[in-house]
Amino acid sequence: MQFANVDGRRVEARPGSQGQCPLCDREVLSRCGEINAWHWAHKQRRDCDSWAEGESAWHRAWKERFPRQWRELVVGSHRADIKSPRGVIELQASSISTSEVADREAFYGEMVWVLNAQDFDLTIRDRGSYVTFRWKHPRKTWWIAEKQLYFDLGEQLIKINRIYDNLPCGGSGSFLGYDKFVASFSQPKPGHKLCDQCWMPFASRQLIETSMHEYYTMDLDPGTAMCPDCYESHREGFIPDDPSLFDCYTPVTIY
Ligand SMILES: [Zn+2]
Ligand SMILES: [Zn+2]
């Protein structure tokens, strides 16, 4: 994993450091070699998240396409690779079982799959507005997937429209650039906006829009949109422990 908690902050691995797993809270050690991307690993080798895959360069490159606030977020008993305003993006490089595909789809609900398809044996035909493909030695697991599949070809994606679940296997879809993919997952749904702090989507009416009051009391620019949790934790940082220090600039809640 890319982030561990060190002194309450999410930090990346540096040589010879230790931290806590954001999911199970157990000790993790930095692994900073020359082959894999620098990452954190559990001290007792087994990852607490049974769905976790190794941190390959491919995984890391995908995570880097998104803001760090969206990477490796704890969702229930798992760490989602990317949790965007449009749902979870699961990155999958190795083969997994059909039951695991079904489990993850049921667990996350709003999610898509991005598969590392660079070693899939695909023969692709560009037909202008769409593509068709033949898939030699298909990973049949993906025949049962109900969520949107994206095949990452290394230079662009295919957004899968359909895969025929028989042999010889083939299907259709359309080419999609990384930029467009990222943009489509970064836009909140209609009626929602992103919190300027945690970058998570909220119904617009849930967000607190700051004014000059917050500028003077909490050092926030006017017009900052914050979710209630971020607002509250930011405000707490500006409340003095000593009540005698309360003055007109103390950030009390205004209702
Ligand atoms: Zn853990
Ligand atoms: Zn927030």
Image: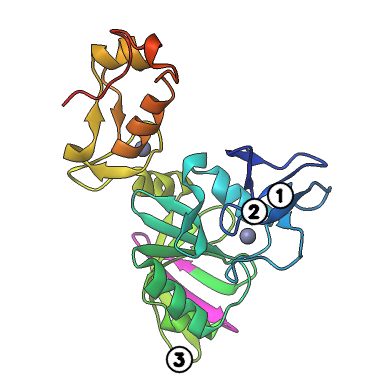
Q: Earlier in the sequence, mark 3 or mark 1?
A: 1
Residue 252 pos. (x, y %): 28, 21
Q: In this picture, is 122 found above or below 136?
A: above
Q: Which residue is mark 3?
A: 166
Given residues 20 and 200, the one toward you in this image is 20
Q: Amino acid at mark 1?
A: His
Label 1 crowd (10 A; few <14 / some 14-19 / many >=20)? many
The residue shown at (40%, 10%) is 245
212 in the magenta segment: no
What separation in Å lies between label 3 and label 1 (alpha carbons)? 39 Å
Q: Which residue is mark 2?
A: 1
Magenta-highlighted residues: 125-138
Q: Which residue is mark 1?
A: 39
The residue shown at (57%, 52%) is 22
Residue 30 pos. (x, y %): 76, 47
The residue shown at (58%, 67%) is 117
